[in-house]
Amino acid sequence: MRITNNMLINNALLNMSNNLNRTQKYQSQLATGKKITMPSDDPIVASKALKLRTDVAEIMQYRRNADDATSWMEITEATLAQIGEVIHRFREISAQAANGTNTPDDIDKIRTEAEELKTQLIHLANTTYAGRHIFSGYKTDKPLMDENGVFNIEISNAEEIRFEVGIGDDINVNVPGSDLFHRGAEAGPGDKSFLVDTFDKVITAMEAGDHAQISSLLGEIDVEIDNMLRVRAGLGARMNRVELTSNRLDDDFVNFTRLMSLNEDVDMAEAIMNLNNEMNVYQASLATSARVIQQSLVDYLR
Amino acid sequence: MKNTTFLGLDIALRGLYASQRGMATVSHNVDNTNTPGYSRQVINQKAARPMLIAGKAGMLGMGSDVVSVDRVRDTYLDDKYWSEAQYYGEWSVKDTILTDMQAIFNEPSDTGFAKIISDFYDTLQQLSTNPSDPGTRNAVKEKGIIVAKYFNSVAAHFDHLQEDLNNMVYAKVAEINNLADQIRTLNLQIYNYEVMGNKANDLRDQRTYLVDKLSKIINCQAYEVETGLKLPNGEPEKRFVVVISGKALVDHQHVVHLKCEVREEKLNLEDIGNLYEVLWDDGNTIDIKSGELKGYLDMRDGNDGIPAANGQGYTPSCKGIPYYQRKMNEFVQVFARTFNEGIIDVDGDGVLDKINGHADGYKLSSIEGDDPSGIRFFIMLDDEGKPMSSEDFINMIYQQAGAAGITDDSDTPYDERLVWGYSRFLTARNFCVSEDIISDPVENISASSEAGQTGNNNNLASLLKMRHNTYMFMEGSGEDFIKTLISTMGVDGQQYAVYLGIQEGIMKQIENRRLSVSGVSLNEEMVNLVKYQQVYAAAAKMIQAYAEVLDILVNRLGL
């Protein structure tokens, strides 16, 4: 084939530009740490990258939701523990009051404590978490009951606040007041809480000094204790589930982040090797082009 | 014929002339080594007509003659170049434009759609864990605005790009016309030179070079046809013709220009106004098959081959700007309808269902007995570019639907007028967060599924569930839809780059073969130079020898 000067020049230029293109590709990979900068570099990687990024972002959000659920439930659990102590103490002093050997003075002292316990119970029923009443179901802006233990709002066990902790996986984080304070029955404004009512009945009997009546009410208090334990057990089970979910989300986060990195991040060692390789080729092409292009017969004619 | 006294000088003189011409040609070649489109020239040297010597002694050589100066050219390679250059032009345009389009989508990145929509849903999730929190409600509004603005910005960029492409179409048509005029001028010049039997080498090079340029812009063929007449020197008369899809752009001295005419009806619903249609100047339609012009037209008009909006045929089957605009519009229409109204296929039977949408929720301060808020979250800008209020938007739909004869079918769980309205009016360009949400997000974001329940997040849960509804689009969920769109773009871009690479290879090959045949080789020219120089010196020597001979003859012979 006849080789002409412009062929040499064109070929040299084309090859150098190809070399530079490849060098630039590895250079940009190293600079960004990513395999691709545009979908057309590798549509499969790009589409996987979009999916995995969304997945990772979602998992992070579910983790936050699970954390929120945990704190809500921890507050509820702590409050339930206090309510449990209140009811137990109330059972204790009631049993004491049921004893016929008490003087009226003693009973009066016990009654004072019983009333304190009742006030505390009602206070606990209106516990808030970040400004929200935790036992008020959906009406978190309103306290559950007034100072007499009468419900302020309509409340039923159906008012479950649910947090999403996974795709299609949600968990109810709250204990509706009706479950704990009304033995699971629906209540409306003006209804008296069964639990407070039990307290009231005992206190009334104490006022009357009616040992037998107090004694017979002990069974009713036991029913409330059982109810409270049932609610706590249910909450405990749910907290357990959130914890498991939380652990799983942590694992997912690590796994998906790893997948994401595998998919789109550059293998630095490989990219550096490739870059060096390309640089060598580029330098070789520069050197040879320079030698070939500048020489012709013109240089040797005297 | 007799042997004249000065015959030898004449012969030597011819040698001088021939060498001079040879050197002149070498010089011309060397000077034009870098001239684009130049083909090297060689002298056509022949032994001069010999002289018959009396007495059967034979013929006496009369030295050398340069009959012509020819250009070295393989016209097969020109044809080949012209037929391949059009594809090179088309793919290089498409490759560039698609790179621009990918930059507009800006994926994968930390500022693209995936991130923006993901942020929006994250904030909704946060709101669902604390539905009455004013701060989070404001955040939902802001993230919603970012989602809407993303679509506005992408649509606006596509509009600008379409306008740029339209201008490029105009510029390319002007370039074609300009090239046609130049070719016509050269045709006349070449004809005038050659009618006397000369060869217009350099002008022919120029003309070929112009056709080279033209063939990148549009599919064309160029050839010489014999007219059937004869030139004075007996050669057949030829005219040069450049043809585009069967019709002559240039026919010797005749030129038919192309023109750009503003379309009266849009080819695609998504188009911006005042796009050009390319026609022959005489009003005939032109079939543009490839070349840069085709690249620009395809990317400007390509809508995946769906029927044209003006009812005239089909759009180009390429996925150009209107295709992506249409897909973006489809996304915002379905997304807004789903989010606002809860009208979506939930069970995958292909029929729309009705679940709770944003409008079915309740305002923050609602009290028992209140109606659902009726607030739409994502709607559209009005004619003045301001976000509409939900009420105005719905009233407008009802009114327009009434005018269009659309009614609510009571057998379906949803309102047909709304379905019609969303796909009729919403576009990526006018997509926005409603005025109600912007002015009072704390009150108007409808998180609760019951009136008067500030802690109720069930309506939000319904909205959040839509994110993973895979029956939302044929492509799957909303995010799947956009992902598919972006990977379609990526696949197309990759394909264009591959085609362009192949075409570059082919062009390179042809170009090299052309250079191999027609290019100037300095080495070769130098060898020729030495050759001619030596012959010149030798011929001069001959003259000197004859001069000495004549000296003897004239001066030494005593008379």
Image (cartoon, coloured by chain):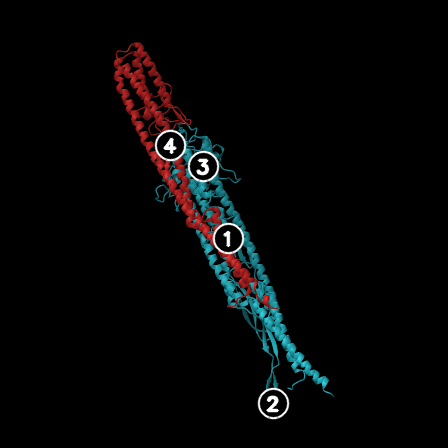
Chain colours: A red, B cyan
Residue positioned most to the bottom = B55
Marks 1 & 4 on one chain: no
Residue type (three-letter) at the residue carrying disc 1: Thr
Residue B417 x/y as whole percent: 42, 40
Whether discs 1 and 2 lie on one chain: the answer is yes
Closest to the camera, between mark 3 and mark 4, is 4
Residue B357 placement (x, y as % from top left): 40, 37
Dot 2 surroundings within 10 Å: few (below 14), some, or many (20 or more)? few
Q: Chain of mark 3?
A: B
Q: Which chain hosts label 1?
A: B
Q: Are marks 3 and 4 on the same chain?
A: no
The residue at 68%/80% (across/down) is B547
Q: Residues within 10 Å of mark 4 (few under 14, many from 20)?
A: many
- Cα–Cα gap, marks 3 and 4: 27 Å
Identified by mark 4, the residue type is Ala
In the rendering, at what x and y percent does residue A115 appear?
A: 34, 16
- Dot 3 falls on a residue whose secondary structure is loop
Nearer the N terminus, badge 2 or badge 3?
2
Quarter of the image holding residue A244?
A: top left
1 vs 4, front mark: 4
* Secondary-structure class at tag 1: helix
| Contact check, label 2 and label 4, Cβ < 8 Å | no
Kindly report the distance in space between the C-alpha atoms of the residues bearing marks 3 and 1: 38 Å
Q: Which residue is mark 1?
A: B96
Q: Is residue B215 visible?
A: no
Residue B55: image tag: 2
Residue under label 3, please give it: B377
Q: Do callouts 1 and 2 mark residues in contact (Cβ within 8 Å)?
A: no
Tell which subunit mark 2 falls on: B
Report the disc number at residue A69: 4
